[in-house]
Every structure is written in structure tokens, then in C-alpha cells.
Amino acid sequence: MARNFICRCEDATVEDVRRAFEKGYRDLESVKRYTGLGTGPCQGKTCLAIAARELLRLGATPAEVLPFTVRPPLHPTPLAALAAMDPATLSLESGVPVPVPPPAAPRPSAALPAKAKVVIVGGGIMGLGLAYNLCRRGVTDVVLLEKGYLTAGASGRNGGGVRAQWTTPTMIRLARRSLEIGERFASEMGINVWFRRGGYLFLAPTRTQAERIEKNADLHAKHGLRTRILTPLEAKEVVPELDERRFVAASWNPDDAVVFPWPYVWGYAARAEALGAKVLTFTGVTGFERQGSRITAVETDRGRIACEVVVNAAGAWSRDIAALAGVKLPNEPERHEICVTEPLKPWLGPLVSNLGNGLYFSQSLRGEIVGGMGDPNEPHAIDTRSTLRFLARYGRALSECVPAAAGLKVMRQWAGCYDVTPDNNPILGAAGFDNFLQLNGFVGHGFMMAPAVTELMAGWMAGDPPDEIFERFTLDRFAQGDVKGEDFIIG
Amino acid sequence: MPRLPDPRFATDCAITVDGDRVSARRGESVTSALLAAGRPLVSRSPKYHRPRGPFCLSGSCAACLVRVDGQPNVRACETPCRDGLTVESQNALGTAAHDLLRAIDLFTPGGIDHHHIGTWSQLASRITVGASRQLAGLGQLADRVSLPWPAAEEERFDALVVGSGPAGLGAAEALAKAGQRVLVAEKERAAGGRLRCRLDLPRDPPLSWVEQIAGAVGRAGGEVALGAVVLGVWPEEGGALAAMTQRGESPRLRLVRARRVVLASGTWAQPPVFERNDLPGIFGARGLLVALAEDGVVPGERAAVLGAGPEAEAVAARLGAAGMKVELVSGEVARGRGGRRLAALELLDGKTVRCDTLAVATPRMPAAELAREAGAALELDPATGAFRVRAGADGRIADAFWAAGEVTGPIGAAEAVEAGQRAGEAAAHG
């Protein structure tokens, strides 16, 4: 029995690394995610060098074996220890790692074609979901450009929650469709996404918040959701470890789910490629060629691609991509921090969120508690550094909410960027040019909306009549002053 | 002979391990007590439930996670023994010694591809998700709520030195000499870094030098903090902010602001790669020598030492002097043999080496994490896959940050002292 371990924390073997490499996961960031190596309690201290050596032996370049990003804390640290810090004394400005320009870029996954019918900018779940759904609708001349590795952006950095508990019929409809797709994703796309309907439990710490969830629950009932308003003691039946003194009511929907984000991204990419699309990693967009009201080609750091349609699905970078075409989007990137704890046997069923402070946490299929909370003082900028302030705030918030969690040790923290719009709703459809389509501005819930939205968008691009979302979430709504906002944003 | 016959190493307390009474010395690590008791099998692997035991013996590898007094996922190698301490194995149906889930390993000879298992139908996928959730995770949630930690007070030092090995102490010496208040943060229970192994290589400073530097640091108003585990160092205006947990009877979180930081964080032990390289009985050589020198632990009867060069030879000599039969293995290992403990190594050249202990003295990986957080550039050694921190001649890596010692690549202890002194002087005046 050949068991030749590279990573003991995750039982990842030489064979696992070889398989990943053969599938095209060549750089160490991707190999880490695909095999799990380096994601366990030692955080790569015992496997980084041997993983790099193995990849070099398989034919990886030195640029491809650059170590995966280092993440605090260096040692697993109890939430109680982190909660001992006063967040008010800690700065959002001071984050790590300090960005350093890489000495060389890993090699792109494929050659750059001269032309394509559709060019999608951004290899997150939006772009990849769209590429896959376009192929299914017969539009296979699709090229997707991703400047990093797959899962480098917010699609690889989020908490994996998928919920139907929203505040408008449109969002409820989209989320329910995403839940349906998620339920079948593993068997239809051939890759496990660890979809688990553990439910979502929203805690309302004040009467005002309680009124909000009560109003939402009425709407949910009208649309056939099983949302119920629970008293604190009833909520404790769902999560016995909750401190019931910290909230006055809770909103509970047992059908909401949590998934593992990375394989969603890989699954869409693999199937899109199998159907004819080209997914090019490590290929950055540098500009656009324009003629009158149309974009005629996309310029990249490896050459140009002539095209008929461009889709901007670049998430937090969408504003910058649009700016390259001279189009001004109101989107603003905003960092959101997140962390995981040591893995434990299952004890927490649902994703729990506190509406008072934005705290959310759930237990992943691997047993870790994955959670985060937004910071009201966060400036708008692309910033994926990790702060000590976040650990202090999260440590306090989680151990207040679940006192038994105070002993849980944080293993790794990281950050991703929300793509924030003025009304917390997305921007869809043409902007600036007839053939420059936007698929961005999802404000932290893009991951859960993508399966449904990309299916509708592909249908529309393939000739279906437009869904109401393409009439409602246009860029010009801001000019017309029609900005009734979504207010159920967490994290 | 589980311990050296020296009255210093006599046991004076007992801990409970999966219900068995194990004699121990107060304050030594649980792993020392277990190795002395001939119990290298401490845990089960996460996926295949293979027998596992401590490897690094120094708080980096996480192969020795156990439940201690009701707290899950605690490193045995970082847990001091005291009378009545309760240690339980985790992630096993039964105990680590007898785990029925071992069947997973036996029935999946080709490995488990977690991406594709159960994806053939929606029902299979649901069952896979349900079963995986139950099987995943290591320990159970803690039995009781932990007490709040005391509020962290900010402390200010002129300089922070991470690591108290030759380079760290060299830097601390230079900083103290320049009148700087230095905090030396050492995650282990004793200062000295690799000097604690007593390799006694030519030009190695004696252990008494460690005490001498600690004294000088104290006289300059500084501190050598033992059991101070740095969690991260965040660069900020005019220096850096470090967070560290201070271990001890009543643990606390320390928030340290320092104008200068010298990273002398050393290296992490790296396991060798061969078939069944995870058998209990395979250890990082340095961790093993510290357990031998400080706790008198003799880990078995026959040891193989993997590696070449003066350090590997010194490791073999130390284990030999402790009464073990020792063989130095410099060829490539094909596979390990044994069930619950290493029994032999098969080499690529066909030779078999009988041993119950393997001390791994091959190159280690620079502990570059903190330097990388501060923005240091790295250099790859393609032979080992190790990345070392690229530092200037005086050790500078970024504003307010210096690095010295093995974190910058292989370097002898005496040279590391000098590199540390250069970095310390530059930091004092930079």
C-alpha cells in the first residue's frame, strides 16, 4: 500500500500531488487548495518544502512553487486569547502580509487565441458559471481570462453560505434556484462541493432587528420558504451552545445551506473547458480596443483577442476593468476578513449570523469553524492583508455569542474583497458599449447567487427574453435615482 | 532503557493516558513521558486513521494532537506534565492504539479522492456528505467553557527578537550592549534553540553562554520570555506590533510594540518522503536530542539517523552514547516497515536497516513566516525545496525588520551568533 505522505495534517500523499499536477493545478497555491496540503493544524510548516520539491520534480517552474501566502496566526490561538485584546487600540491599516511583487509569474494554463465570440474577464464563480452555462446553451467560442489562479479572488475566500432568507421576491427566487443547483452540483458536475442544508439562524439582538426578521419571515412564507421566528430558548434547541441572553429573537430556515467554495469554481471551469470554452489563468487584462459603440478586442499581458462580446465579471476588480474601457462604475472594493479554527467533530448545524454586528460562522464539512465579520471602519480599497484588529473583534464577538467556543483555536485568517454598489444590488447588462456586459457588484453574496444568475445571463445572451433582473439591475438605475437598497448583507 | 539512569531524570508524577497511568517528570512534555514509556503511537491520521506519533517534538508539526483535561487538539509536545493530567487520544473509534476506523486505510489501497467520491448519483453524494461530516474533524468540543484571558496590556520595547537560538541571542547581545531594552520571545520552555540539542559541534557556543546573554539582556532592562509564542508581527508606523501568547500557569496575551524587530526564528523539522513515512517512531533529530538531553528520554533500542554531514554524525554519536544501537543512513529510503511502530527501513539499494527509531537529520525548512509577513523576499533551494529569507549583509529585510541565523539558510551555530550580532548592531543603530 503506497502511502507516501507529504502533508500529515490532511493525509495528502505524493500521489495526490501528482494527480493535481496532471489535472493542471501546477502552482503551489492551487495544489494546496486541490489536495488540502498545508491547510491543517500545522499550516504548512511540515510540508511546504517537500511539496515544493515534489512539484519541481514533476516539472513545475520555480515561479510555480512559490510558497502559498503566509497567514497569521503563526500558532493556533484560542479565541479567548484574541478576545483579550481591545480592538479599539488596533489599526485596520496595519495588515500582513506586506505585498511583494512576485519574481516571476506562473505559466498560463493555455495559449492565447486570436479571437473569440465571448471574452469573459474574471475567473471567479460568476465568470466560470457563465462560461459553463454559455457552453450548455451552444455558445462555446468562449475565452475566460483570469489574472491569477482559480479561486484567487473572493470566490475562493468566502464562507460558502447559500441562503434563501432575503428581503425581496427577486433575491429569494434567485437564491432558491442556486440552492437547487447546489444540491445537484456534485452529481451533475462530477465534483464534490460538500453541499449541506444545515440551515441559517439569524440572531436579532434588538427589538428593531427582531421586527426586521419578522417582516422578512412574512415575505418568506408568501414565497413558500420554511422560515420561522424563534424565541431565544427555541433557538437554543437548534444550537444549544448559544448564549440566549445576547438576542431577543431569531430567524430560522432549515433549508439554507453551506458549501465548500473551491470545488464549485473548479467544477464550473472543468465542465466549461470540456464543452469547448478556454479558461486562461495567469493572464491579465490590460486594455480594450474600441470602435464607436463597440469593444472590438481585449488586450492582455500576453497579446490581444478580437471578440464580439466582453463580460466584466471581475468582482472587486470590476471597477478597474471597466475603467480600462473608459466606463465608470460606482462599485467600490471593500475588504472583509475571515478565519478558520482547528477542526472539531460536528457540533454546529447551521450557519449562525448576528444581525447586530455582522458576525457569521458555520462549521465546514472538515469540522473547522469558518467565520468572519465586517468592520464598519473598513475603507474602500483592494486590500487582502490580515489584521490583528479583526482577530480581536471576531474573538470577542464569537465567544460572546457562543461561550463554549472561547477555547476554539484560530488556525488561519485571510481576507477577500466585496464588490460594493450604492444599493447593495448587482450591476447587470450593457454599460458604456453595446457589447460590454456587466456581471458584477454582488456585495458579498455573489458566490451564492452565481449559479442562478449565470444560468439566466447565459440564456439571455443566447437569445432568451431577458429576466426582470436584467431590466432592473442596470447601471443607469443610479442615474435615474432608483436605488431602493438591499439591507440584508452580512459579513 | 527508556530513560538515562541519572537521578536528574527520575520520575516524580503520573499522568493518565487513555486510562493508563504513565510516570512522568513534572514539567517535561507529555511526549517525553510517552516516549520514555515506549508509547510513540499517540494519535490517528485524519483521513485514513493510520497510527501516528509525534514527529517534530517541538511544536510545529501537529502530529501529536490529543485531548488534555477536556480541551481538544492540544499538542502533547507543548503540554507540561503534572500529577493527574488527563490525556486522551482523539479521532478514533476506540483509542489511538486500537482504532476500528483503521479499516478505512486497509480498504482504500489506492487512496481516497475526496473530490470525486460519491459523485455518481445525488443519493450517493448525500450519503457521502453525511458520512464525511461525521468522520471529519479531530477532537470533540471542549467539556467546559474556558475562562476569559486577562485583558492584554500594551508593552513597549526598543527591540523584539524572535527566537533564542544562537542568532537570536547574538542579536540580543548586540542590542543589549547598545543599551536597548530587548524582548527575546522564545516559544519553547528553555532558551538556546539548537544549542539545547548538545550537538557540541566545533565552535558551538557552550550552553553557559545562553545564561550569560540572558543576564545581559536583563541588566539592560529587557527580558528573555520563555513560552512566548509569537502569533504575528504587524509592521506599523515607527516599528511593529507583535502579538504573542505567554504560556504558563495563567496564560496571557502580550501585545508588544517595538521599534525594531530581529527575526531569528530558525527552522522547522521536515519529514523525509518515502512509503509509510508516517510510522510512529520517526522523529526530527533535534527534537529527539532535546528530549534526550533535558528529560533523559531514550526513545528505543535501535536508531537509524537519516542525513549526512557533521550534524547527522553528531546526532548518531549522541544516540549511541545514550546506549542505542545506531546506524547512519545516507542513502535514499524506499519504505518503512512496521505496524504500530517503525521496525525497519528498506533502502533503495536493497539494504534493510532494522530500527525502532529514525532520527531525521536532513535539511530543515527556514521558519520564514514572520519574515514573509513583513515583506521579505525568498530564495529557493531547488535541492531541498526549502525557501530561505533573502537578507542584506547586515540582515535587513524590510523597514524595521532584520533576519539572522538559519531562517536565512543553512549556517553553523557560531556563524549564526555572528550574523545575529551584525543584525542586532544594525538594528540598534538603524
Image (spheres, coloured by chain):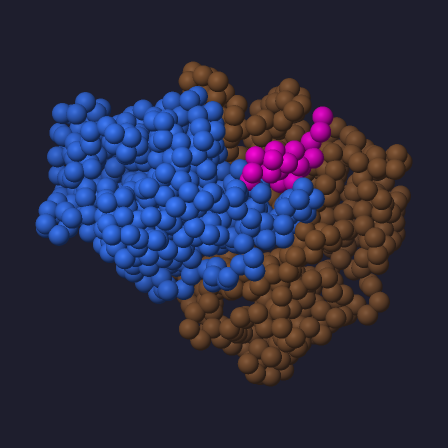
Q: Left or right? Give the position of A386 relative to B212.
A: left
Task: Decide if residue B209 is in sight here.
Answer: yes
- Colour seen for chain B: brown
Give the residue displayed 34% in from the left and 53% down from the top: A289
Q: Quadrant of the N terminus of chain A?
A: top right
Image height of A417 relative to B135, above or below: below
Give the residue displayed 69% in from the left and 35% down from the top: A4
Q: Nearer the viewer, residue A380 or B394?
A: A380
Q: Of all residues shown, which one is farthest toward the front?
A: A291
Q: Which chain is blue?
A: A
Task: Decide if residue B41 is in sight here.
Answer: no
Q: Which residues are magenta?
A: A1-25
Q: Residue B310, position in %: x, y?
A: 84, 59
Q: Residue A5 in magenta?
A: yes
Q: Nearer the viewer, residue B16 or A135?
A: A135
Q: Residue A101, position in %: x, y?
A: 51, 61
Q: Nearer the viewer, residue B421 or A403?
A: B421
Give the residue displayed 62% in from the left and 80% down from the top: B425
Q: Residue B118, position in %: x, y?
A: 50, 20
Q: How many marks?
A: 0
